[in-house]
Image (cartoon, grey):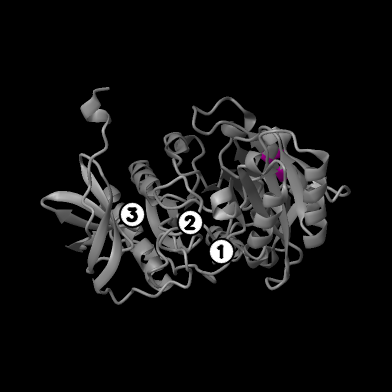
Amino acid sequence: MSRRRSRRRKIPVEPIEVSVESLTQEGRGVTRIKGKVAFVEGALAGETVLAKYVHSRSQFDVLSAEKILLKNDARIESDCPVSGICGGCSLRHMHPDQQLEMKQQMLLDLLQRATGLTSVDFELLPKLAADASHYRRKARLAVRYVEKKGGALVGFREKHSSFITVMDDCRVLVREVSNLIVNLKCLISSLSSAADIPQIEVAAGETEPDPGAPLAIALVFRHMKPLTPADQDALTQFASEHRIHCYLQPGGLDSVHRVYPDAGKERLAYFLPDEEVQFAFHPVDFTQINGPVNRQIVSRVVELMAVQPGESVLDLFCGLGNFTLPLAKQGAQVVGVEGSHAMVERGYENADLNGLKGLEFYCADLFKPLDDAEWAQQRYDRILLDPPRSGAIEVIQQIRRFSPKQIVYVSCNPATLARDSAELLARGYQLKSAGVMDMFPHTAHVESMAVFEQQHN
């Protein structure tokens, strides 16, 4: 690489005044400076702001709002003292109701672009939301011992930086975890291996179905070198004092093991009271981070699918059975398919926990052509899709082999949902309804849902 290309672009030091035209899918303001696109973090559409350059690229610049000269009515004062620095949230300056309105419009715009359909062509489902504070039950907290900062830092990384935000609590982590941050900083600082602990995985489970009940907390400490007996004793003592589950991770995920408590199964739990279902999960299993919103989503899926006893349902990307078990509760014959053997085992474990017999779980790579497995040769009355961010295009291109009369698609990426919707329309399905759910308040992340029905010629 030439010296010219390897040098960083020089950026202006003084803030400049800009007018923000719109918002990106990441929640950043969009403007143009001398014809060049610029993204302004912390700014809302229609605002005029003083903004400081963060970095410059050949195709675009990134700035950060320093002062708001003309405000959007949706702007609010953040209740978080580090929201301008911390990378954990991007929209704390926008009212939660407006955040959800923005996310709904984003979904509608993407659907129209991909399919040509507008909101008059299908039913707009009511938005789903819950308390926007202290909702996050799973997180990866960065850890670094920085002597100049007075010891260990524990929290989310700063925007545009590998540095860790100096924070004593967090407004999105569940209170039980937020209240531990100061104590965790003291704990890590006291360890001889403080410099060898780069992260802590957080998982919270429910202790009973009541939404106001205390949460059970598990912390997984990643450590790059073996811990001394004294350090391990300090961690278990901390876990005992704060009544949390303590796990160590010396290597890959298969190395995770619990050191406190030393008895009982390595599981947390969550409940779906409306469906009378409970789940057991390991702290490193994938589960939804927002328990109250997940309850609403599952209830809506059960209502929309309206399965009848004896109907067959295929739940693709089923995880540990978050939808599979509630649908089986309705009397359907449900098949869940997931790419992880561990999740398949967890699905059967939870089926046994709930006394459910009429369901099966299989492990398969759903991003490849479907094989000759028995489950893939059957027809199903209804299909549920809950894929990762990359979407379910590979499955949808083979959807006719299953011939479902209804497809419910739960998405964590509206762009791939829109793309996949166009493919479903091309394969003879009609979009009946769609809507958004605020699984990740104060971020630009959009969770959405769409319902398709088979057209009859």
Give the secondary structure at mark 2. loop
Mark 2 — residue? 88
Is residue 342 visible to the viewer in this orientation of the structure? yes
Q: Position of residue 210 (x, y in %)?
A: 72, 71
Give the secondary structure at mark 3. loop
Give the secondary structure at mark 1. loop
Rendered image quadrant of residue 67: bottom left
User: For the residues marked 2 and 3, what is the alpha-carbon distance in whole angstroms?
Assistant: 16 Å
In the rendered image, the residue lying farthest to the left is 34
Q: Nearer the viewer, residue 316 or 280?
A: 280
What are the residue bounds of the magenta stretch? 343-347
Q: Nearer the viewer, residue 234 or 123?
A: 234
User: For the residues marked 3 and 1, what is the alpha-carbon distance in whole angstroms?
Assistant: 24 Å
- Kindly identify which numbered label has been placed on residue 170: 1
Amino acid type at image mark 1 = Cys
Rendered image quadrant of residue 192: top right
Mark 3 — residue? 25
> In this image, 85 relative to 14: left or right?
right
Q: Tell me which numbered mark, 2 or 3, is placed earlier along the sequence.
A: 3
